[in-house]
Amino acid sequence: MIRGLLALAAAASVVAVKPGADLPKVDVDMAEISVSGISSGAFMAVQMHISYSQMINGAGILAGGPYWCAQDNVALALTACMTDPELISPFYLEGIVRATALSGFADDTRHLANSRVWVMSARNDTVVDTGVVKAAADLYSAFLTDPSSQIEADYTHDGEHSQITVGYGNPCTTLGLPYINACGFDAAGAALKHLIRRELVPAVPGAAPQGTMTKFSQAAFVGALFTDAFGLQDSGYVYVPPQCEGQKNICALHVAFHGCEMTLDDIGQQFVYHSGHIPWADANGIIILFPQAKSNLLNPKGCWDWWAYTGTAYASNVGAQTLTVKRIMDSLSGQPLTPNTTLSDEDLSARLEAAYRRAPGAAEAAAALLSKRPNVTAQA
Ligand SMILES: *[C@@H]1O[C@H](CO)[C@@H](O)[C@H](O)[C@H]1NC(C)=O
Ligand SMILES: *[C@@H]1O[C@H](CO)[C@@H](O)[C@H](O)[C@H]1NC(C)=O
Ligand SMILES: *[C@@H]1O[C@H](CO)[C@@H](O)[C@H](O)[C@H]1NC(C)=O
């Protein structure tokens, strides 16, 4: 116990850095901010986009599913949102998005209207069913002005559950660490080409980085005592290509979320350097933020929180991880930091839960779920 406290005290003193003080100085184009992710990172990207659609205008989803798919319930996360997409209730989830926004726990859904969305499910993915990814696209359709042009979907490439790249990582249909597979397809590039609203200069996959990777303190944004409970590493990474360094040019910002087990040991570095984003960043002047999750008792695999291990608010704009990443984005783009003082407010959780219960379709969705799978809630 005492040793634990000393360790905490030591950690706290290490992170005396002011939030964002160690982030590079850049000029972010506020009209060109997007997010993407693989697997739990894809769920996280969706949560970020729905929560902060006033700032974020596009989301890339590789092997992830719709907003609030898991509904605070790990049993649903493991069934409906991975292998049994027929258990997903699109009408209910749409109601949840609307109720969350109406209650002020996500930006107004009209900010989603002009968003771009990119989804991909590789054909040999044995972890997240293609139906789950399609459900994410379907849910977005309810909020976009012209879904057929705003959503790009790719279900045609081979690949296991992984960050799909041209030539880095495991053989294409292998499942395993580092969950980056060489499939002759550039998923990062495909997502960026759709999400960014200008013609991109083609990049050479695997090209050596020309810019600077900065390791910065995530802990400074939450306080060192909270990183464990929040499932966040002490440090994250941001990549700045040469043309964006020192505020030389106004540059797009893209946030790339890794998947589960991808920050254990040095594996996070592999995603950061080999996800496929860097060559596109260099060729086009795009800043890439790589936030880093970490494992804790409730989250042994170091996944992003998409089933509530950090609390009920996880998917909203006051979630421990969503709000922290938003604050990092604020800092990087020179905006005032969104306050984080509300995170531990019990009253806030109660209000959020009340909003979820009021969502249209909540009762029907619960009944439908129970009839399809009588004991799914009992497992939670
Ligand atoms: C991957 O999926 C495609 C399409 O279903 C299939 O043709 C191919 O044989 C699969 N590859 C492996 C190694 O299972
Ligand atoms: C809020 O952020 C500050 C740093 O800006 C940090 O010191 C504090 O611990 C954070 N509070 C919570 C509840 O996360
Ligand atoms: C679910 O219920 C069925 C029958 O009601 C039972 O056979 C099965 O073992 C249960 N599954 C779990 C995981 O509890």
Image (tube, rainbow, N blue to C red):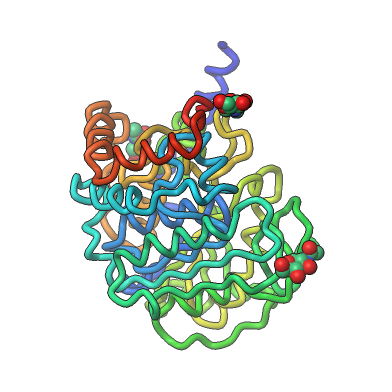
**Where is residue 279, by image quadrant?**
bottom right
The answer, for residue 290, to whether it is visible in the render is: no
Residue 58 spot, x, y in % from top left: 39, 68
Instruction: Kindly identify the residue that appears in the image at 35 percent across and 38 percent down.
Output: 313
Q: Residue at x 29, y 37 (%)?
A: 363
Q: Nearer the viewer, residue 1 or 323?
A: 323
x and y percent of residue 172 in the render?
76, 65
Query: Position of 320 compared to 184: left or right?
Result: left
Q: In this view, does 224 lie above or below 218?
A: above
Q: Quadrant of ligand 2?
A: top left
Residue 12 located left or right of residue 110: right
Relative image position of residue 256 (x, y in whole percent): 52, 61
- Between residue 357 and residue 335, name the one nearer to us: 357
Residue located at (73% from left, 71% from top): 183
Q: Is residue 183 visible?
A: yes
Residue 337 in the image: x percent, y percent?
29, 51
Q: Residue furthest right?
A: 171
